[in-house]
Amino acid sequence: MKIAYDGRRFYGFQRQPNLRTVEAEIIRVLTKLGIIENPKDANFKGASRTDRGVSAFGNVVAFNTFKPELTSPRILNHHLRDVWVLGRAQVPEDFHPRFWSKGKVYRYYLLNEGFDIEKMKSCAEIFVGVHDFSNFAKLEEDKNPIRKIDRIEVLQRGKVITVEVEGESFLWEMVRRIITALKLCASGALSIEEVKRMLEEEVDKKLPPAPPENLVLWEVKYDEIFFEKDPYAVEKAKREFFERFAQHLITASIFEDWFTSL
Amino acid sequence: MKIAYDGRRFYGFQRQPNLRTVEAEIIRVLTKLGIIENPKDANFKGASRTDRGVSAFGNVVAFNTFKPELTSPRILNHHLRDVWVLGRAQVPEDFHPRFWSKGKVYRYYLLNEGFDIEKMKSCAEIFVGVHDFSNFAKLEEDKNPIRKIDRIEVLQRGKVITVEVEGESFLWEMVRRIITALKLCASGALSIEEVKRMLEEEVDKKLPPAPPENLVLWEVKYDEIFFEKDPYAVEKAKREFFERFAQHLITASIFEDWFTSL
């Protein structure tokens, strides 16, 4: 299943006792509807264990079930809160959403506080290609710090800048630490040469990750897995996304008026 | 004290047992700091008992205290949550924030979903002046339904429309029911003549109020009461308003991308 969720409403993706997590919310509904008995027997797996605060438009979860007819997105979405099933696919027995992934796309959202966009774009280029990202990640044991970034695109859209990052796989906090570098570069606090050195040499102090709430796991890519859409569920999700867009835009306008009027 | 608050975070203004209300939040801090002993003895009064969901940028509360030196906005704001003191004034003994008010300004925020702005402006003109607003209010006993609206201004600001309404005093839900009429007019569902008839004649069915979350009590006006500002508190509030603006704008952008990408 391809799923979207509002990361602000959860304590991260991975299930943890007594906390509202994305996995727990999905498993709650799957077990309630009798689609799975429990996550272990159903071999429930997610493509990406996004951090607390991070949202997704296209994360992927997989599980075994004897009742595939019950997994219709319109039924699941009726029971899910702050999670939306946007598509489903029947997959080979040995499918694993993480290991079968051919790449991931992240989108980071920044308020344009007078950033130099051209400088941000130049800084982004440094990260494209194969690099040792040790200085731009929270390292985990036994993980190869060498990764390949296929593409970083910086787009100015009114007051908001989006940065889209595509790669085969990412280290922990890697996207958010790259974003911090881009912000510091675009505000003039770091030169492009300094960022280059941080990527190529050892550093005393790593840059901290940018806030998780502004990050969206946009897509997990696969070869030859086609997600079937449920038109009714898609229309309903669209309406709900529009409703949340409208609410947040109005609230943003209210606070904008307050700080400009003070 | 002139106060701002985020109405989404409270169960309305007026204190109610076991509910988080704006009044309760202010009284909690005033008693905790020893500024008042209890609201009754301090003759604690608010200018406007805004409905659940409604925000304010300039509501006014008044109380008696023997310790005016403790009422500095910077101290109060350190303890208040989702409420900000933006100014204070020493007032005459018989001051009452509601009865002394010379007028109120409300601001309503609308997402522009293809509204005909010119038609909305024409419709707004109908309400200006002295009218019996019985059909555009939830009537309370013993309240004179005749009110005077001084000004309604419709402003288009990008994707958002603001409607500013000024009058001496308002009936319950009056602004929000007028807004519903403006929306229906601007979307073509009601003609200006129909709205005029609703204002002048008896109706079978009143229009419902527009959502409270989009309404802000912008200002309560007085003659010769001057609110003294605390520059430090104002700067801090500005930063917090900016922070909330940024968060909501980013979240709006994320959901906007989701519904346009589905």
Image: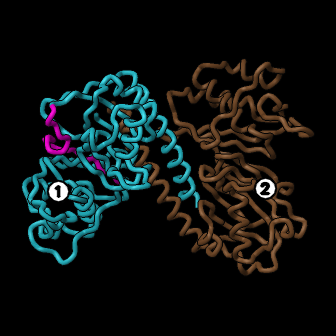
Chain colours: A cyan, B brown
Percent position of residue A74, x then y? 40, 26
Label 2 SS? loop
Residue located 79% across and 72% down the image: B90
Badge 1: residue crowd in 10 Å (few <14, some 14–19, many ≥20): some
Percent position of residue B174, x then y? 75, 37
Task: Classify B247 as above or below A229.
Answer: below
| Residue picked out by circle 1 | A122
Task: Classify A108 as above or below B242.
Answer: above
Residue located 79% across and 65% down the image: B62
Number of numbered discs on residues:
2
Q: Quadrant of the C terminus of chain B?
A: top left
| Range of residues picked out in magenta | A93-110
Picture quadrant of residue A61:
top left
Chain designation of label 2 = B
Residue lying farthest left?
A: A130
- Rounded to the nearest angstrom, the CA distance separating label 2 from label 1 is 54 Å
Query: Residue type at mark 2?
Result: Ala
Label 1 SS? helix
